[in-house]
Image (cartoon, grey):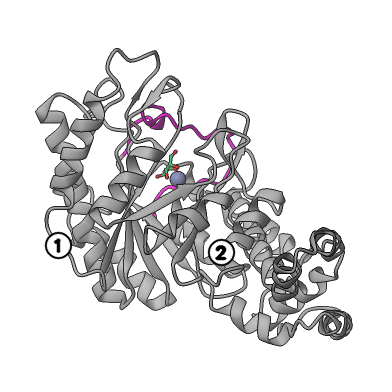
Amino acid sequence: MAKIDNAKTYEHAYEQAKDIFALLGVDTDEILNQLQKIPVSMHCWQGDDVGGFEGGGDITDGGIMATGDYPGKPGNADELRRDIETALSLVPGKHRLNLHAIYAETNGKKVDRNELEPTHFKNWCDWAKEQELGLDFNPSCFAHPMVKEGLTLASRDPNVRNFWIEHCIASRKIGEYFGKELNTACITNVWIPDGYKDTPADRYAPREILKQALDKVFAEKIDPKHNKDTVESKLFGIGSESYVVGSFEFYLGYAIEKNVLLTLDSGHFHPTESIADKISSVLLYIDEIMLHISRGVRWDSDHIVTLNDDSLAIARAVIQNGFQSRVHAGTDFFDASVNRIAAWIIGMRSVLKAYLNALLEPSNTLKEAEKNGNLTKRLAMMEDIKSLPSGAIWNYYCLKNNVPPDGKWLEKVEQYEKEVLLKR
Ligand code: RNT
Ligand code: ZN
């Protein structure tokens, strides 16, 4: 149990909350065991505004953007790793780290993205081993001069296209290396920004080109024990408002036909469209999916995750049917206007709270009511559940994991900011 002030108060609150949930047939001790087994892949790129260590490169060529100039941004991989360690020390549970190719360490040598190799990620891998973290990976198809007119894998120019095919192939090998070294499959996620600002004259041709390019990327079979491939769709980005080649329908079809995973990013759909309701549909046709849990706000797809109806609905869609092993949760947001480490912690803790809330629901009773046509009971219960004391369960879970409860973690970040971040 974490040594924090007033630990007794939190334990007492847990015991009371536990009794209340028991009245509904929910065993909170058992729920906490289940929550303990849910890893969330924390994205490394919140740490430095999707900067990476190559120098140069503007992420807006990928239709994405981080705004804000909060002090303390890490300048190298060691600093970023230290920030990640700090963030994860304030998040209960065992999680994973999601890396991007732009975070390669090339020892001052210029290594272009199509030439990246596992050695350029050895430091990350050794560190992950030491921290007992699984790694996931992403080719970085943005912030690079070979992004031509907003296109990468879907470019008509074979030089451009082949460069990115090579980069994606190199990335899968890095994923395989992580998987082998860390004894847990790496999920390598292909996302490309390709699209048009204005109305295309031909919506089909770029998709044909992309399909063929992806076939080349995935041609070599890699043991899924080490690396699993996934593809991420998007509806629009900055500068690709009218058309994105890799749309949801495109990748849904691709994933089904080619037996790869599908990534659903909660910020990549129409603002009123939620990924939560897609999960139970796509899992009828695809074995496993990855989630990029984010928070869309108007045109932006990458605000810090909070505990809101959207994140709750996502967690519910996973938990209701016991899809934990088929749905790989991850985060994806970038905000440079607040302390970057706090941003990670807020997002990660919110995702976990959403999962906890979903686990705490008396799901069988709700399903039973629905099956019996008692829709009044279904709605009444769903409303009543909202004010159950799940916060007490959460704080106890934090204590159990040696992590400060709500209201207590921020002071640790403030201390780190004073001692480390502001001295950079
Ligand atoms: C962009 C996608 C993608 C990126 C990262 C950096 O819209 O969500 O996942 O956020 O790869
Ligand atoms: Zn994403």
Where is the N terminus found, in terms of image quarters? Answer: bottom right
Look at the picture and state if 15 lies above or below 54: below
Numbered marks: total: 2
Rendering coords of residue 371 (x, y %)? 70, 68
Rendering coords of residue 54 (x, y %)? 30, 41
Q: Pointers 2 and 1 in contact (CB under 8 A)?
A: no
In the picture, measured across the screen, residue 90 lies left or right of residue 247, that is right
Kindly tell me whether mark 2's CB lies below 8 Å from ligand 2: no
Image region (quadrant) for ligand 2: top left
Mark 2 falls on what kind of element?
helix
Rendering coords of residue 166 (x, y %)? 14, 44
Question: In the rendering, which numbered label is found on residue 318?
Answer: 2
Alpha carbons under labels 2 and 1: distance apart: 29 Å
Picture residue at 44% right of the left edge, 67% below the top: 326
Which residue carries the number 1 mark? 221
The residue under label 1 is which amino acid type? Answer: Lys
Question: In the rendering, which numbered label is found on residue 90?
Answer: none
Picture residue at 85% right of the left edge, 71% below the top: 389
Q: Nearer the viewer, mark 2 or mark 1?
A: 2
